[in-house]
């Protein structure tokens, strides 16, 4: 197999190319600016190599689903523009090697329009009157235009209470994840995307109305989930629907329900709202937990577990706890 050796690009040239790319994306250059851009490219072969790589980066970003790609540069926030510039510099400087890191690191989540911190439940009212709630450690991009209302879920979970479309021409309300699309059919529903990796899935729970699911590798929708049911899907297929559980939207009110739930499973759910590491020893993993717990204070939840079960919580640091036998 042959390998193409790409020329080395210095950080200075990568940054200059990224800045020119952002200026071009912002709008047409004046004649003076265009001449300065051409002069910069002609001044050094490395400059031209950096620009050629910048163009490849630009074309790749434009193929990124939804509003992230180059539209990241449209956002008015100075902090977000600086983050976008930094990302461009890294990708231009790294060349083809950088795209492996691009796919493997959560930079999409870092640059998302809306994010929630670990333990934070964030409520947002959308432009059409719909209500969007971000679960702990979640990230989304929102794209509303003349043809569609679309939310791209990059990580975590969201709850949506859709409103009637105020636009003259109806625009479908759609959620996109790594595994496919969910189209709302007059709906209150929740979507959770597993962390990336083998076996990851998107989980959908419908409280009212219905949703239509289309995995990314299918041309047509493959399943409709009605109110009171939930399902999950990957890139190719959907699982059979099952009855809705209490926790499907309890987190929106900051609650975590347990109904004879194994302790290990309960702690896995609780850990999503707690910074650091929360472990469960194997010798207590099958103990059963029941009740309603407030997610605002996970230490208080762990204290309650010690009072109701034969377990002890050991704190090694502020962010590292382990639940084991007495």
Image (spheres, grey):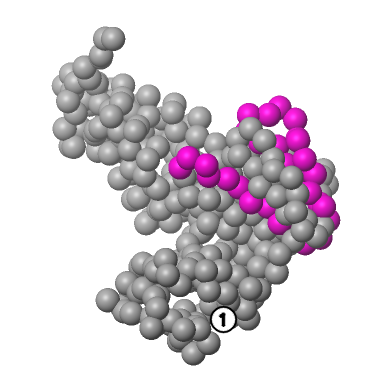
Q: Which of the 4 image quarters holds residue 206?
A: bottom right
Q: Foreground residue, 112 or 20? A: 112
- Picture coordinates of residue 51, whole percent (x, y): 29, 25
Give the mark count.
Answer: 1
- Residue 257 in the magenta stretch? The answer is no
The location of residue 246, given as percent across then percent down, is 70, 69
**As drawn, 252 above or below 31:** below
Q: In this view, does 210 lie to the left or right of 9?
A: right
Q: What stretch is highlighted in magenta?
A: 197-226
Q: Is the magenta stretch mostly helix, strand or loop?
A: strand
Residue drawn 37% across and 25% down? 55
Task: Report the front residue among 116 and 15.
Answer: 116
Residue that protrudes farthest toward the bottom in the picture: 307
**Which quadrant is home to the C terminus?**
bottom left
Residue 37 visible here? no
Left/right placement of residue 22 relative to residue 149 reads left
| Rendered residue at 24%/38% (across/down) | 15
Q: In this view, does 127 lie above or below 215?
A: below
| Label 1 packing within 10 angstroms: few (<14), some (14-19), many (20+) | some
User: Residue beneath label 1, please?
Assistant: 294
**Residue 196: image x %, image y %?**
47, 45
Identify the secondary structure beneath mark 1. Answer: strand
Observer-nearest residue: 213 or 164? Answer: 213
């Amino acid at each position: 197999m042959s390998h193409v050796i790409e020329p080395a690009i210095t950080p200075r040239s990568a940054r200059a190319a990224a800045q020119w790319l952002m200026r071009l994306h912002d709008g047409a250059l004046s004649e003076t600016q265009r001449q300065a851009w051409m002069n910069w490219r002609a001044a050094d072969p490395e400059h031209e190599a950096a620009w050629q790589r910048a163009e490849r980066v630009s074309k790749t970003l434009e193929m990124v689903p939804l509003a992230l790609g180059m539209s990241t540069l449209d956002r008015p926030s100075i902090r977000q523009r600086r983050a976008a510039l930094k990302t461009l510099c890294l990708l231009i400087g790294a060349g083809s090697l950088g795209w492996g890191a691009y796919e493997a690191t959560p930079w999409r989540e870092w640059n998302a329009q809306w994010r929630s911190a670990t333990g934070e439940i964030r409520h947002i009212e959308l432009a059409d009157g719909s209500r969007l709630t971000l679960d702990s450690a979640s990230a989304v991009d929102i794209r509303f235009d003349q043809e569609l209302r679309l939310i791209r879920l990059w990580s975590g979970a969201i709850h949506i209470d859709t409103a009637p479309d105020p636009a003259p021409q109806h625009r479908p309300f759609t959620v996109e994840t790594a595994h496919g699309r969910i189209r709302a059919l007059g709906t209150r529903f929740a979507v959770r995307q597993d962390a990336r990796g083998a076996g990851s899935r998107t989980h959908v729970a419908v409280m009212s109305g219905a949703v239509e699911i289309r995995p990314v590798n299918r041309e047509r929708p493959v399943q409709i989930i009605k109110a009171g049911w939930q399902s999950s899907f990957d890139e190719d297929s959907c699982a059979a629907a099952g009855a809705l559980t209490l926790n499907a939207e309890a987190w929106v009110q900051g609650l975590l329900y347990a109904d004879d739930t194994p302790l290990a499973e309960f702690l896995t759910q609780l850990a999503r709202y707690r910074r650091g590491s929360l472990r469960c020893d194997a010798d207590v993993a099958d103990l059963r937990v029941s009740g309603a717990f407030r997610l605002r204070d996970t230490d208080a939840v762990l204290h309650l577990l010690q009072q109701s079960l034969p377990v002890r919580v050991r704190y090694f640091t502020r962010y590292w706890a382990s639940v084991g036998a007495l």
